[in-house]
Image: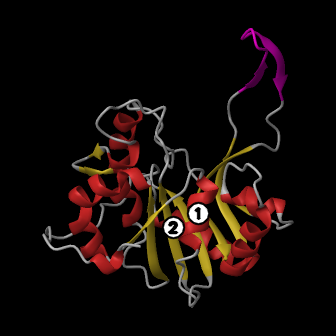
């Protein structure tokens, strides 16, 4: 059986979330933080050997005070990220265990994830070395001018909206990031594409959306009800295991 290391990215600035108290991965959703919903579908899987959560350095103190018990109970490693998403993933990759055959990267702000979608994208990556969840673009696309007027209607044929998890053979992702340099990228699949790799698409679901604004939390709460019941996280433990922090 292939072994997977899972990186959950929670180091972004959440500039569009516009909440003075929370960044979006740490906002409450159905009585728990968003990031806890996002990691739970990877817990207790026989094929997952490691869970890494990447947070911003400036969030470390507040995160530790609120979630140290959860980190200890769930056996999650917490890694400080960098300025850009690619910097954060690079730092997390340095902690991936050598026994992991594959690395999956998931957005902490995508809490509405079903286990069957994880199964599907994991299986696809085993066959192809790289696979992502994505959904076909359904709406009409317009290219606008700087004056916010329509310049062109863009064909949506062949266009897909990328989601996470995005899953890659470990050495492929390591080599792709090593070759990336300072190029700007929007997701990990693009890193592999720039390296010359081929990325398979596994059809996802609109339910697996990324929380961007505070209003999205209301939609997420309804979406969670359509998914299998979440695993119980267990009672709080007041003692944090510092060995889980890097």
What is the quadrant of the C terminus in the image? bottom left
Q: Secondary structure at mark 2?
A: strand
* Residue 89 image label: 1
Image quadrant of residue 177? bottom right
Q: Position of residue 39 (x, y in %)?
A: 40, 64
| Residue at the (54%, 56%) spot, across then down | 82
Q: With 233 as the anchor, is 211 left or right in this view?
A: right
Q: Nearer the viewer, residue 91 or 137?
A: 91
Residue 232 seen anywhere in this rendered image of the structure: no
| Residue 173 in sight here | yes
Numbered circles on residues, count? 2
Secondary structure predominantly adopted by residues drawn in magenta: strand
Residue 179's place in the image compared with 9, above or below, is below
- Between the C-alphas of marks 2 and 1, the distance is 8 Å
User: Which residue lies at the image location 44% right of the left edge and 73% below the top edge?
Assistant: 51
Label 2 vs label 1, nearer the camera? 1
Give the side of residue 159 with respect to residue 17, left or right.
right
Label 1 crowd (10 A; few <14 / some 14-19 / many >=20): many
Residue at numbered disc 2: 7
Q: Which mark is residue 72?
A: none
Q: Locate residue 167 relative to residue 9 in the image: left or right.
A: right
* Magenta segment: 140-154
As for residue 224 lying within the magenta part, the answer is no
Q: In the depicted view, which residue is nearer to us: 34 or 116?
A: 34
2 or 1: tag closer to the N-terminus: 2
């Amino acid at each position: 059986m292939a072994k997977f290391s899972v990186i959950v990215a929670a180091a972004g600035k959440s500039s569009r979330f516009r909440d003075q108290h929370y960044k979006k991965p740490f906002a409450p959703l159905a009585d728990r933080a968003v990031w806890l919903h996002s990691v739970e579908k990877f817990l207790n899987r026989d094929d997952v050997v490691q869970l890494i959560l990447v947070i911003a350095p400036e969030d470390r103190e507040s995160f530790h005070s609120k979630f140290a018990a959860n980190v200890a109970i769930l056996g999650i490693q917490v890694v400080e990220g960098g300025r850009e998403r690619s910097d954060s993933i690079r730092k997390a990759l340095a902690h991936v265990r050598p026994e992991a055959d594959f690395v999956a990267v998931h957005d902490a702000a995508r809490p509405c994830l079903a286990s069957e979608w994880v199964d599907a994208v994991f299986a696809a990556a085993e066959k192809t070395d790289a696979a992502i969840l994505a959904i076909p673009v359904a709406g009409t696309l317009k290219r606008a001018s700087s004056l916010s007027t329509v310049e062109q209607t863009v064909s949506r044929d062949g266009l897909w909206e990328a989601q996470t998890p995005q899953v890659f053979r470990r050495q492929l992702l390591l080599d792709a990031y090593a070759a990336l340099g300072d190029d700007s990228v929007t997701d990990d699949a693009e890193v592999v594409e720039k390296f010359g790799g081929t990325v398979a698409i596994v059809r996802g679901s609109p339910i697996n959306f990324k929380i961007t604004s505070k209003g999205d939390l209301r939609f997420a709460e309804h979406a969670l009800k359509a998914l299998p019941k979440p695993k119980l996280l267990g009672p709080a433990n007041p003692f944090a295991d510092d060995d889980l922090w890097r």
